[in-house]
Amino acid sequence: MIAFILFTVSVVAFAQFGVYYWRATISTVAAQAISDRILTAAGITHAEVGARDFRNILILNDLSPGLRGPVGSFKTIRAYYAAIEKLGRIVPAMASWAEAEMTTCSRYVAVLMDQHLARNMASASQARGI
């Protein structure tokens, strides 16, 4: 019985560490600069990417399969965004935190799209011999 309790506590602690590490990775990527090319292509008219721009960026991702890169369709970040969005609606006290998390998700996807676009443009110019 004690072994089972220790195992369960270890699994929960490991899962919690994994979630914290994943969120830290997303925050680090989201803190990087986003070029105007992605903002314009996604139809974002304001200077900063916000929480509500997530779907516009995903539409851009769906319309440009060549920019997907290794992440593909962003299934995990889509699920996280949806869960946070629902949590923000259900618990009004967490609305501002949920808004900040959704903004981080939007910026994360925009940065990855920007990085893939830059790599594709570099590959295309290298292939042309420029």
Image (cartoon, rainbow, N blue to C red):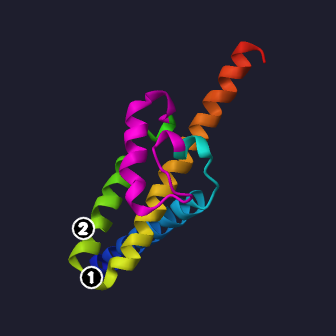
Under mark 1, the amino acid is Pro
Within 10 Å of the Cα at label 2, are there few (<14), some (14-19), or many (20+) other Cα atoms?
few
Discs 2/1, front: 1
Left or right: where 48 falls relative to 18: right
Q: Is residue 87 visible?
A: yes
Q: Is residue 21 above or below residue 122?
A: below
As measured in the structure, the alpha-carbon distance from the residue carrying label 2 to the one carrying label 1 is 10 Å
Residues at circles 2 and 1 in contact by the CB criterion of under 8 Å: no
Q: Nearer the viewer, residue 79 or 19?
A: 79
Q: Is residue 9 above or below residue 36?
A: below
Q: Residue at x 39, y 71 (%)?
A: 99
Residue 128 placement (x, y as % from top left)? 71, 14
Q: Residue at x 27, y 82 (%)?
A: 92
Q: Is residue 123 above or below residue 75?
A: above
Residue 48 placement (x, y as % from top left)? 54, 60
Left or right: where 76 falls relative to 27: left
Figure quadrant of residue 62: top left
Instruction: State the mark number for residue 86.
Output: 2
Under mark 2, the amino acid is Lys
Q: Residue at x 44, y 59 (%)?
A: 105
Start-end of magenta stretch? 40-68
Residue 12 placement (x, y as % from top left)? 35, 74
